[in-house]
Image (cartoon, helix red, strand yellow):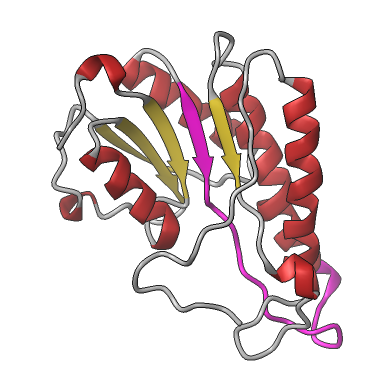
Amino acid sequence: MPMPAANAKNVIVTGASSGIGFACVEGLLAEGHCVCGADLQPIPAERLQADPTRFVGVRANIADETNCGRVVARAVEAFGTLNALIHMAAVHSTLTWRELTTEHFDHTLAVNVTGSFLIARAAAEHMTSGGAIVLTSSGSINVGGVGGRGRGGPAYVASKAAIIGLTRALARSRARSLRSAFASTPSAPGQPKRP
């Protein structure tokens, strides 16, 4: 049941076209929040069954600073304020040490690490009176995934390990206006679980 408008929050969700990002959008809308979904791919808005005044979709490359600014500006334009960012956009890399190229490694870091920094910084600038930013890491950092057969490889593991340090730095830098926490979540319904 949707919550009263007074308790509703305005949230940006990246990686909103599929997987955990899409599940976050669905859940937030079902609870009565307003959501700006961002993704490189089109967001299947017809599957959301939401009040069109509470959802806007933006096609954006999170690894691009201008695009991140555009996502935040669109959310603020649509809803007036911004209360939270749930950053799920990422690329997965299963390449092993032998398969990995410098270009692929750099691309994975650009999307997963630099993109996290860019969207978090853009969102934080609009959360001067409080807010929450969720950046996502992976359990693969604890086992040191080697890649192959769908498992995260060195580029993915390195990028997700960097998110832990980035989150800590963000939390300390913006402690007066933002809340941060570490959380572990299962895969979204219908998504394969990684070993």
In this picture, is 135 found above or below 83? below
Q: Considering the image in quadrants, where does the N terminus appear?
A: top left
Determine which quarter of the picture holds residue 135. top right
On the picture, is 34 further left or further right than 125?
left
Q: Farthest residue toward the top?
A: 129
Q: What secondary structure characterizes most of the magenta part?
A: loop
Residue at 76 percent across and 78 percent down: it is: 145
Determine which quarter of the picture holds residue 94. bottom right
Residue toward you, 147 or 129: 129
Residue at 76 percent across and 48 percent down: it is: 164
| Residue 33 image position (x, y, % from top left) | 29, 30
Q: Considering the image in quadrants, where does the C terminus appear?
A: bottom right
Visible residue check, residue 51: yes
Determine which quarter of the picture holds residue 170. top right
In this picture, is 168 found above or below 91? above
Residue toward you, 144 or 155: 144
On the picture, is 143 further left or further right than 150?
right
Residue toward you, 79 or 69: 79
In this picture, is 43 found above or below 84? below
On the picture, is 21 further left or further right than 45?
right
Residue at 74 percent across and 77 percent down: it is: 153
Residue 118 part of the magenta segment: no
Magenta residues (range): 83-103
Residue 91 part of the magenta segment: yes
